[in-house]
Amino acid sequence: MNQFINQLPKAELHLHIEGTLEPDFLLEKAKKHLITLPFHSINEIQQAYNFSNLQSFLDIYYQGMAVLRDETDFHDLAWRYFQKAHAQGVLHADIFFDPQAHIERGLTLDTVSDGLCNAVEKAKKEMRLSVFLIPCFLRHLSEDSALDTFAMCLKFKKVITGFGLDSSEVGNPPSKFQKVFSQARQEGFRITAHAGEEGPPSFIEQSLDLLHAERIDHGVRCLEDEKLTNRLVREKIPLTVCPLSNLKLKVVNNLQEHPFKKMLACGIMASINSDDPAYFGGYIADNFEACGTALSLTKAETILAARNSFMGSFLDANTKAAYLQKLESYCDEHLN
Ligand code: HPA
Ligand code: ZN
């Protein structure tokens, strides 16, 4: 691992905590809860992580999270991720979780929230890592289900920064969720949405116009629409790009074809993130490195990606400025 990239101060803005469930953790928790898995070894699990598109990944992702059953499991999962993120230069993380996927299995939101919050507190104290929690609505489910989930989440308002939209994009446009995002905005929550991963550029537009998303997750298909590209630049909309995810889910054929460098050249506020690192072969610095190598990113482009990560975060303006200052000092120290 390139030391400069690894320690470069950065924020992670696109990370599903359930997507950090590593094979050894899956086996350990299955054993603890006496759950029979279709896999018997780390090797077998790794071989199953061979995806043809988003849906083929989601099927395995929802199956894997069945081993998360109590507060300790959620704590342990998040704590493992925070340690990895800290070791790869992450100073702040806005992280996603999928409440509906756990409620459907009979868990309470208290179990999920208490486990995650305990790990967040520990990360703040022991590593000075700041973390914001963002529940996502599953777009393959109905808006009524999202509305019920939103109502349940209000009890945890103090520990929730915003709401997101994830899961199967094709056939589930942002327009399906206008009511629930309108309620979320009225309650003062920040808004982000997955769009333009497999879905068309019009889903990015809908996320901005109908859901009033402040940020777009993935958004890699935006360059297909010049007018939209210009709008993203003009309105400084952050895009949370995940190169290794795009490669694994065949959104791009290879990393050399990835649009990240073009996005930066156009002036889009694009950052580099890991999405579901346990499934896609790498954490945030691995994404920086793989993308940097494949696209011959310059030092200036790499630093811009880190800068965009702080700019696009849901941190307040003063904290953002403090982190940007840290980034600048790091670069002064290591490049001169
Ligand atoms: N896209 C949509 N839904 C998801 C993803 C993703 O990349 N990861 C976890 N849920
Ligand atoms: Zn995602």
Image (cartoon, rainbow, N blue to C red):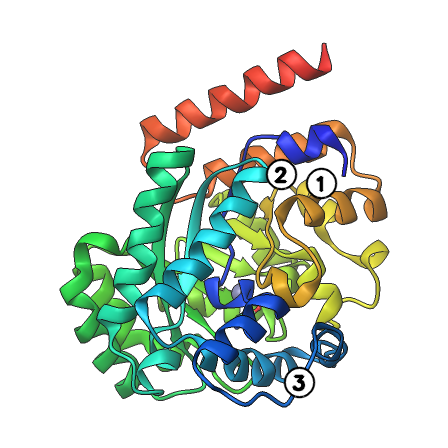
163 displayed left or right of 235: left
Numbered mark located on residue 265 in the image: 1
Give the image location of residue 100, x and y in percent: 34, 80
Q: N-terminal of the two: label 3 or label 2? A: 3
Relative horizontal placement of residue 121, taking residue 52 as reference (left or right): left
Is residue 307 or residue 195 the one in the foreground?
307
Residue shown at 41%/78% (left/top)? 138
Q: What is the number of the mark on residue 49?
A: none
Dot 3 corresponds to which residue?
39
Q: Nearer the viewer, residue 303 or 12?
A: 12
Image quadrant of ligand 1? bottom right
| Mark 2 residue crowding within 10 angstroms, few (<14) / some (14–19) / many (20+) | many
* Rendered view: 308 above or below 44: above
Q: Residue furthest left?
A: 155
Question: Is tag 2's residue or tag 1's residue first in the polypeptide sequence?
Answer: 1
Q: Answer with the quarter of the image where residue 139 lies.
A: bottom left
Q: CA distance from mark 2 to mark 1?
A: 12 Å
Closer-to-camera residue (229/241): 241
Is 316 situated above or below 198? above
Q: Which residue is mark 2?
A: 305
Dot in front, 2 or 1: 2
The picture places residue 320, in percent across and down from the top left corner, at: 40, 31
- Name the amino acid type tagged 3: Phe
